[in-house]
Amino acid sequence: MNLKHSLLSFLFITASTLVSFSQNPMDNPMTQTLMKTYDQLLEEDPHDADVLFRRANIYYKCGDYLRALDDINMGFKYAENSEFDTQQALELRANIYMMLHKDEQALTDLNAVLANDPANYIATYQRATALYNLGRYNEAKADFRQLQLMNPRSQEALFGLARTAVKENNIGIAEELCDQAVALTPTNSQVYMRRAAVRTMMENDQGAVQDYLVAISTDQESTPKAIRELVSLSRTNYPVVISGISGAIRQAPKNGIFYFLRAMIAQGHCNYLAAISDYDRIINEHLDSYPGINASLAECYYALGNYDIAEVNIDYAISATNDNTFYYVLKSRIERALGNTESAISCAEKALEKEPESNDALIAKGLAELSAGDAADASVCFSEAAMNNPEDPYLALLRGWVLADYRKQETNAKRCYERVLDMDLPIDEISSMRGFALLFLDKKEEGDTWMQRVLATAKDYDGEVNYYATCYYAQSGDFDKAFKCMATSLEKGYANYHNWTNNDDARVNVAPLRSDPRFNDLLNKYSILFKKVTD
């Protein structure tokens, strides 16, 4: 091997090590040095298939699959009379195609790999997966069974056969196969994560929740992913998730992570009183010590309108750590709710000193500046935030509101609302805010149609969608529909008292309803959500 390829081999080994340990490998200085070296070599010889293959491998490991595919396809084009390893390249391209969900193309490459190396375990597993993804279940089963011949303890084979059994409606067989896989490595959290995924396919949410909780209890490797999955599952089956966590707490009453998980999910569903109870228990029983718990308590009390208690908790959180950018943002919101505008501005500025690009801090500062009567500075803050995230519809609505209501720039405000309509967002979801933009552009009929469609299709598991519908109808002047949506929102448990009674921002609020007697009547009816009774 010549000197250039000796250098490439060293770089390749180094790159593999770097990518394994770096969370964001393409930003790693050593990775960037490697890529510059490959770029220089390709400037000298753009047809060097071996260099293209190696650069494609780096792109693949960094998650840049399109560039990886371009390089490896170019490598195949110039592969003749080179040291290009066609077998390895086919395996890599198959991996790339799989990540791009191009299963047909992956299948072609995997067939070529297995024609030369029938005992290739990884390629067999990938081909089985590609066939499964394509709905070719009998062929997939044949490959999964081949994996069992290669390795009788293959969990990939057992879970693959289990997934196929679910697709064929053989639920009992699927459960048996999953249990066999778990029995092979019962002390490894990954096996419970994989069984949970199959149980989710079976619509066995209760079993999936149990598996995620066992994974959390088994080791720390899968904890972040298990928590994400539980949070995701709670969006469609909140009662089962909470019930499962409560069961885990009964079995391990001193395990702080279960209380934190239950509190976090309850808070995410606006069930603030339940969340506060669990956070308090963690602190009072010394189950954990983490400033984020006090910050979460501050968020809950802020949402309930108990601003003084929120302030005590956020002050503690800020003092307990230097990693407190968002804590200052939250304190800014609390101070603004208390009417302390100068302090609100100061807290937002402290957050920006720590993280100048923080949109949360920019929005907090803009709103505080607006409360202090400085619409010009508020507009600058919102514009800067919009440049950081041009696809945020709420930011566009904030800008339009300030420009129209405070700066009397109707034309510029109209552009902001039109920008919302141009955003590449799911238009039938409440998060797109599309109906509000239509309403503020005097297209009420279109806005009403949008809102009706959202209400008809949304899974409003915690009342938030109906809260925004209440905001929409309050702003459009249709109070009867607004109060109907408000009742539904409260019935579903939307307990954000701050939003109901204090939030006046961006014309996305219920402020027009607050002078109507029906407003306080509804809040009194559902006061158990807030532990408050209105006058």
Image (spheres, helix red, strand yellow):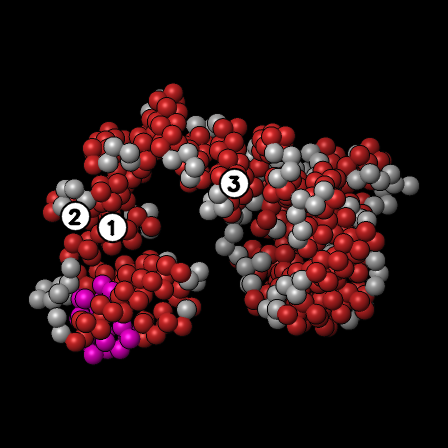
Which-is-in-front pick, marks 3 and 1?
3
Q: Quadrant of residue 36?
A: bottom left
Q: Which amino acid lies under the numbered mark 3 shown in the image of this protein? A: Ile
Residue at 19% over, 63% down: 75
Decide which of tag 1 and tag 2 comes sooner along the chain.
1
Placement of the C terminus among the 4 image quadrants? top right
CB within 8 Å, label 1 to label 2:
yes
The overriding secondary structure of the stretch rendered in magenta is helix
Q: Where in the figure is residue 67, as x and y percent of width and height?
A: 31, 62
- What amino acid type should be assigned to the residue bearing mark 1? Ala
Q: Is residue 166 visible?
A: no
> How far apart, in angstroms, are the residues tagged by discs 3 and 2?
38 Å
Q: Badge 3 is on which residue?
A: 216
| Kind of element beneath mark 2 | helix
Image location (x, y in percent) of residue 68: 29, 61
Which residue: 66% across, 72% down?
Answer: 353
Tag 3, which secondary structure?
A: helix
Identified by mark 2, the residue type is: Val
Q: Which residue was labeled with disc 2?
A: 113
Circle 1 residue: 94
Q: Is residue 40 magenta?
A: yes
Q: Is residue 119 left or right of residue 506?
A: left
Q: Which residue is rendered at x = 57% and y = 37% of the image?
A: 234
Start-end of magenta stretch = 37-54
